[in-house]
Image (spheres, grey):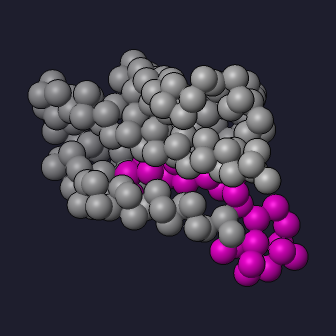
């Protein structure tokens, strides 16, 4: 993802809100929190990356509807990996660590904000059970999940914007 494309946004807040709203809307209308995060960044960076988008699909409802790690969080980690991740195996541990630093910031933010990393703890239900899922969504769960998706996307957007600003000042 070409961070220079962030220059078209007036400021950090504009960029963060644009991407947050896009992710919220995608998750609310189309479902699939991980893909909503990924697609939002593909849109703003004007990239067509079907393999990345498709790779995010099994993470809905906490890793293939198991209730484990939140799919929105995984989508955010995928985006950070695309930007900061190690590009070649021969980059060794240093390449891994450089990519993990921003990812750890996201995970720590998520954990402190929501008190858990797991979808089932966030939703207090088993989304693989159709009856429980219907009840959750009928009770406002879709707004809750879309809100979390938007918040994760906003945090990642802030990290990317700050990285761009740092590179421009060098």
Q: Residue 91 occupies which quadrant of the picture?
A: bottom right
Magenta segment includes 6: no
Observer able to see residue 160: no
Quadrant where the image shows the N terminus:
top right
Q: Main secondary structure of the magenta part?
A: helix
**Looking at the picture, how far across and down is residue 150, in whole percent?**
40, 34
Q: In this image, 14 relative to 150: left or right? A: right
Residue found at the far bottom of this picture? 93
Q: In this image, 72 relative to 35: left or right? A: left
Q: Nearer the viewer, residue 133 or 167?
A: 167
Q: Nearer the viewer, residue 165 or 57?
A: 165
**Looking at the picture, how far across and down is residue 84, in whole percent?**
70, 57
Tell me the residue at 24%/34% (across/down): 144
Tell me the magenta residue range.
69-97
Tell me the residue at 60%/47% (across/down): 162
Asked if 162 appears above or below 36 in the picture, the reply is: below
Tell me the residue at 58%/37% (across/down): 38
């Amino acid at each position: 993802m070409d961070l220079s494309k962030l220059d078209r946004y007036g400021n950090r807040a504009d960029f963060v809100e644009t991407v947050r709203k896009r992710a919220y809307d995608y998750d609310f209308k189309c479902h699939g929190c991980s893909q909503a995060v990924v697609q939002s960044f593909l849109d703003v960076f004007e990239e067509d990356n079907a393999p990345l988008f498709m790779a995010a699909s099994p993470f809905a409802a906490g890793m293939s509807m198991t209730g484990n790690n939140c799919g929105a969080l995984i989508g955010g980690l995928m985006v950070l990996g695309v930007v900061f991740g190690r590009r070649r195996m021969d980059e060794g541990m240093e390449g891994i660590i450089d990519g993990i630093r921003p990812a750890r910031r996201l995970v720590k933010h998520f954990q402190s904000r929501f008190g858990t990393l797991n979808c089932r703890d966030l939703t207090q239900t088993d989304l693989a059970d159709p009856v429980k899922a219907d009840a959750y969504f009928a009770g406002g769960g879709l707004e809750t999940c879309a809100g979390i998706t938007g918040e994760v996307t906003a945090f990642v957007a802030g990290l990317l914007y700050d990285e761009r600003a740092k590179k421009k000042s060098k």
